[in-house]
Amino acid sequence: MTYEDDGNHYGFTLSDELIMIRDQVRRFMREEVKPIEDKLPHDATKCSPEDEARLRGIAEEMGLGRLNIPPEYGGQENDCMIRCVVNEEASKCRLGGYRPALGAIRRGPPNIIWRGTPEQIHKYGIPCVEGNMTGYMAITEPTGGSDPRNNIHTRAVKKGDKWILNGRKMWITYAGEADWGVIFARSREAENGRPPEITAFIVEPGFPGISFEPIPVIRPLYPYEITLDNCEVPEENVLGEVGAGFGVAEQWLVAGRMPYAAGCIGMAQEALDMACGWVKQRDSQRGLLADKQAIQWMIADSETELRAARMLVYEAASLSDRGGNAKVLASSCKLFGTETAFRVVDRAIQMFGGMGVAREMPLERWLRELRIKRIGEGPSEVHRMVIARDKLKNTEGGVYFG
């Protein structure tokens, strides 16, 4: 990767393969996705099943249907960078916050399913790859979700050949619509200075004792509250080892933060590009809006921040693809990517004026989506703590205080 103008003013040049993939997704978004999206209501959460199936077929032909899937199940090696490049471009649509490319590029199952037994993989993972099932992850509870080891109070008790789960999960996207999910619960309390044991369980909506309730929020795609009232889970549905769920959860969270940030950057980049087109044609007193210093400063700040956010994402994705520990860099991506994207979209709305909050534009919807994304996958404050603690732990004091 070199720092030079690639013709798109993004400030870097990717490998030839990644440039080809990026440009391919851009054409797909322009020629296939946008004409369908233009016909959808402003707050639609999906397109018709027929349109989605057609788009997914095209994505499969492009080789983009199996991202986030291990190679042995038809996926690609070292695909974090690919997923980031694709997710940025696929999020440049009105539904981009939670349905990039209108669902054409499958999310795949929660990636921890590949840590399961062969039977679990073939029952739950493979059908997601083939588009016949969807899954979700449920960590957050009414007490919070940013410190899962200590904030998970859902209990799991072994009874014969079943585990009995009791508790509640909150703010779980897709839970009420999915075919299965992974619930994290305490299987042993903290004792003798040891933290509580957390175990992962695969649940289905038909299991006795599980129910779902949508939670209305500012975005059109509502998350769910899950209630577990003596929910019976078969022993064979323990995912991984008993007591090892915390490590599984952390791996899943870290792996998802780079593409998550990339999607936010994509929405913000599109908002900025739209605003640039607008101010170059919008007359104001004594000239175009583009000639005003206040407007130029908003554009300069936005473009600089987006380039910095993108480079953070690519640094973290590259490290992950090399097998490195990207935990802290992933926190930096999530923090800076979501905060930057929110600021940039807010500035774009300001440059558009009243038109910026009109429902015929995607900007106000993106602002709502991005407000939530500053909380989802761990709020900004938690990621600041992760970054600061790592810096303090690994810094001796520099030249003058070392």
Image (spheres, rainbow, N blue to C red):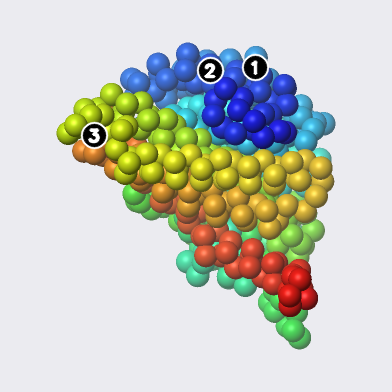
Residue 280: percent from left, percent from top: 32, 26
Which residue does the numbered mark 3 point to in the structure image? 355
**Which kind of residue does numbered mark 2 sit on?**
Phe
Q: Are marks 2 and 3 in contact (CB under 8 Å)?
A: no
Query: Residue lying farthest left?
Result: 285
Which residue does the numbered mark 2 point to in the structure image? 28
**Which kind of residue does numbered mark 1 sit on?**
Met
Q: In this image, 163 relative to 276: left or right?
A: right
Q: Are marks 2 and 1 in contact (CB under 8 Å)?
A: yes
* Crowd rating for badge 2 (residues with CA inside 10 Å; few <14, some 14–19, many 20+): some
* Residue at the image position 81 percent from the left and 42 percent from the top: 322
Q: In this image, 290 relative to 266: left or right?
A: left
Which circle's residue, 2 or 1, is located before the other in the chain?
2
Which residue does the numbered mark 1 point to in the structure image? 62
- The N terminus lies in which quarter of the figure? top right
Q: CA distance from mark 2 to mark 1?
A: 9 Å
Number of the front mark, 1 or 3 = 3
Residue 365 in view: no
* Residue 295 versus residue 247 in the image, above or below: above
Nearer to me, 343 or 197: 343
* Residue at the image position 69 percent from the left and 46 percent from the top: 316
* Residue at the image position 65 percent from the left and 52 percent from the top: 330
* Residue at the image position 59 percent from the left and 20 percent from the top: 23
**Which kind of residue does numbered mark 3 sit on?**
Met
* Residue 35 versus residue 226 in the image, above or below: above
Dot 1 falls on a residue whose secondary structure is loop
* Crowd rating for badge 1 (residues with CA inside 10 Å; few <14, some 14–19, many 20+): few
Which circle's residue, 1 or 3, is located before the other in the chain?
1
- The C terminus lies in which quarter of the figure? bottom right
Residue 273: percent from left, percent from top: 42, 30
